[in-house]
Image (spheres, rainbow, N blue to C red):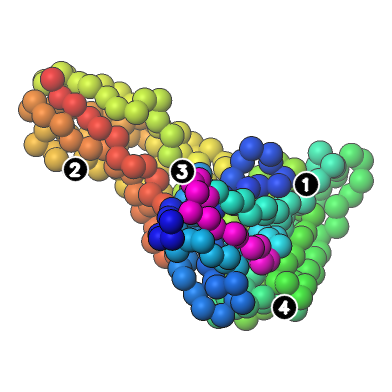
Amino acid sequence: MAGYVPVDVYVADLTNPGQYVEGVLVKVFDEEGKKVYGQVNSNADGLASFLLYAPRVYQVRAYKFQVGIQNPIIMDVSETLPNTFTINAHPVEVVASTDPRICMCSGHFRTPSLTPARGVDIYVINKFSPLLVDNTGVLTERSHFVTDKNGYVCMPLIRCGLYDVIIEGYEDMEREIAVPDAPSCNFPNLLFKTVGSVSLDAGSYEVRRGQTIEITPQVYTTTDELIEGTGREDVTWTVSDDTIASLTVEWDKLTLYGNARGTTTLRATRSDSSIVRIPDPPLTDGIQIRVL
């Protein structure tokens, strides 16, 4: 019987069987690809759900930056459930170095209209001198890299090395980078490094009224480097209701003091908002603190 039926579209990751891709824009058209019936971003499970009229044939197109997707796919939606379809996606693979001394720093740059920033000159000047690596001398000079037609650049840099970076158009904004001890990293994340995530040893905490507990968090940058201690210069730690619990932030630990029975929330936010990230997920979803 004709009518509207639920339709599920999954975006599968071809590079990781059994995994799915989040944040893909899935758009449903009529069979000719002219009329739009809806668009949804895939969730954490790679799922984009629609309510579509059946029986009918639809054309589906999907897009996400740095993800290869063969478009379009055709969905023949029927009155019989389930109507489940799969879009195969191929995220761009990160280039990794096979040299244990080198980190491959790569990534894309785009213009304010989000088109590829082609032909952008990037100068990298090492800040170490003199240096011997495996009995070879490393010269003190600037290296020159240029983004390709897709706005992509890949540069091999010495692990743990300090460099100054100058980008065409931003000559007055020289930035210092510290290359991670890793085979690869995302260069824009390295260039505009911020706090990326916070990890705690429990999903919630309990403290008795009049007593204290100590918490040792782990704070990571956007290049997955561990920041020493509580990261108090980069992270603002707060409790939502300090009448229930008060917080002391020390270099190496957080101390919670139980003031009154009840429940409050421990939160971590980035102290520096000068670098805007889109999307910008919170460092924590809020850690429940219960005072007994």
**Helix, strand or loop at mark 1:** loop
**Helix, strand or loop at mark 4:** loop
The residue beneath circle 3 is 197
Looking at the image, tell me whether mark 2 or mark 3 is earlier in sequence order.
Answer: 3
Figure check: 204 above or below 12: above
Judged from this view, the residue extending furthest toward the right is 136
Q: Are marks 2 and 1 in contact (CB under 8 Å)?
A: no
Residue at left 77%, top 51%? 95
Query: Is residue 5 in view?
Result: yes
Residue at left 8%, top 25%? 261
Q: Say what amino acid the circle numbered 1 marks.
A: Ala
Q: Position of residue 252 (x, y in %)?
A: 39, 31
Label 1 crowd bin: few (<14), some (14–19), many (20+), radius 10 Å? some
Q: Which residues are magenta?
A: 71-83
Q: Which mark is residue 118?
A: 4
Looking at the image, tell me whether mark 1 or mark 4 is earlier in sequence order.
Answer: 1
Quarter the C terminus occupies: top left
Left or right of residue 207: residue 195 = right
**Helix, strand or loop at mark 3:** strand
Report which quarter residue 249 is drawn in. Answer: top left
Judged from this view, the residue extending furthest toward the front is 1
Looking at the image, tell me whether mark 4 or mark 3 is earlier in sequence order.
Answer: 4
Q: Which mark is residue 96?
A: 1
For the residues marked 1 and 4, what is the alpha-carbon distance in whole angstroms?
A: 23 Å
Label 2 crowd bin: few (<14), some (14–19), many (20+), radius 10 Å? some
The residue beneath circle 2 is 240
Q: Say what amino acid the circle numbered 2 marks.
A: Ser
From the viewer's side, name the closer residue of 176 and 194. Answer: 194
From the viewer's side, name the closer residue of 79 and 103. Answer: 79
For the residues marked 2 and 1, what is the alpha-carbon distance in whole angstroms?
A: 42 Å
